[in-house]
Structures are given as C-alpha cells and as structure tokens.
C-alpha cells in the first residue's frame, strides 16, 4: 500500500495505449478504450481502512485536477435495466461500485475514476481506478 506508487500507476495508465480486446476477469484489466487497476491492498484489516485509502488518493488527485465529479451508479444500473446501452467501462462500474469520483485528466484526453468496489456485500471492499477515453455516461 503506497499512494506514491498508485499515483505513478495512474499517470502510466493515462499515457499507455488501450488494449484492443478485454484482458483479464477482475479489476486489473482493460479493454478497448479503458484500463482498470486495483489500488492499495486487496485485503484491508478493516473496511474503514479501505475507504480512508480511497479518500487519501482522492485528495491527491483533487489537488492535481480539481474537485471531482461525483457519480452514483444507481442511475446507471436503472438505465441498463431499461435496456439503454451504456458504454464500457461505465456499465461495468455500475456493477462494482456505489459511488464514483471522476476527473478529466489535464492534457491527456482521458477520464480518471477512483472508486471502492463495494457493491457485493459478501466481498471485502477494495479501491480501484479506471482510466478511459470515453466520457462519463
């Protein structure tokens, strides 16, 4: 768990080419137009530690890019249920997290979202980042 390393990873994902097809089944994956990676540690001693880590990463990105847009994923899930097409990675995010914090990364043409995967109450929450060239849906 090292915020400096995670910030460097976010910077790398803001410049790395996107894969042509989806890679991997979990948060350390990517696909056409996006990268997704876990941040911090996967097994937190306490769920509050996970949310504190997300807040610390968010604070540093806010210093860099300004206040994030905050998105609740309930509306995305409702739109998907009505049959509306929501592009990736946004449709996938609606299945993982309840709340998203999103910035437009200066000079990269990409969007950076930090969230806690906490939609599944049976799994321990964990922090992840998505970098995409697709504007929020």
Image (spheres, rainbow, N blue to C red):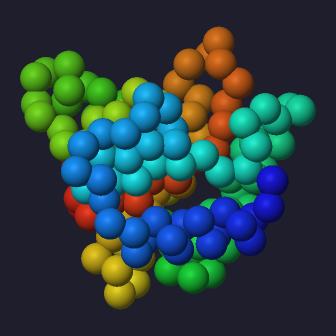
How many numbered marks are there? 0
Along the line of sight, the residue nearer the viewer: 50 or 6: 6
Classify 3 as above or below 80: below
Q: Please give the name of the residue rendered at 56% of the width and 19% of the height, measured from the top-left corner.
A: 120
Position of residue 105 measured from the top left corner of the image (x, y, whole percent): 41, 76
Relative to 48, is 18 on the left or the right? left
Residue 105 versus residue 112 in the image, above or below: below
Image location of residue 34, percent across then percent down = 33, 54
Is residue 118 in view from this perspective?
Answer: yes
- Expressed as whole percent of the image width and height from the top left, the position of residue 107 reads 35, 87
Task: Pinpoint residue 88: horizontal percent, then vertical percent.
Answer: 25, 43
The correct choice, above or below, for 132 with respect to 60 in the image is above
Please give left or right for residue 84 compared with residue 33 in the image.
Answer: left
In the rendered structure, the answer to whether residue 47 lies left or right of residue 111 reads right
Q: Residue at x 76, y 43 (%)?
A: 41
Residue at 38% in and 47% down: 30
- Residue at left 30%, top 53%? 19
Can residue 90 be seen by looking at this rendering?
no
Residue 2 sits in quarter = bottom right
- Is 99 displayed left or right of 48 in the figure? left
Q: Residue furthest right?
A: 45
User: Residue extending furthest bottom?
Assistant: 107
């Amino acid at each position: 768990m090292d915020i400096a390393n995670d910030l460097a990873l976010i910077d790398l994902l803001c410049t790395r080419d996107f894969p042509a097809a989806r890679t991997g089944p979990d948060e350390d994956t990517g696909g056409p137009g996006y990268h997704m990676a876990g941040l911090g540690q996967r097994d937190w001693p306490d769920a509050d530690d996970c949310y504190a880590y997300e807040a610390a990463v968010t604070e540093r990105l806010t210093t860099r890019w300004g206040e994030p847009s905050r998105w609740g994923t309930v509306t995305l899930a409702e739109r998907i249920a009505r049959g509306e097409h929501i592009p990736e990675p946004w449709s996938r995010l609606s299945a993982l997290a309840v709340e998203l914090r999103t910035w437009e990364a200066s000079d990269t043409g990409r969007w950076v979202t930090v969230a806690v995967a906490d939609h599944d109450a049976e799994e321990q929450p964990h922090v992840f980042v998505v970098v995409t060239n697709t504007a929020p849906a």
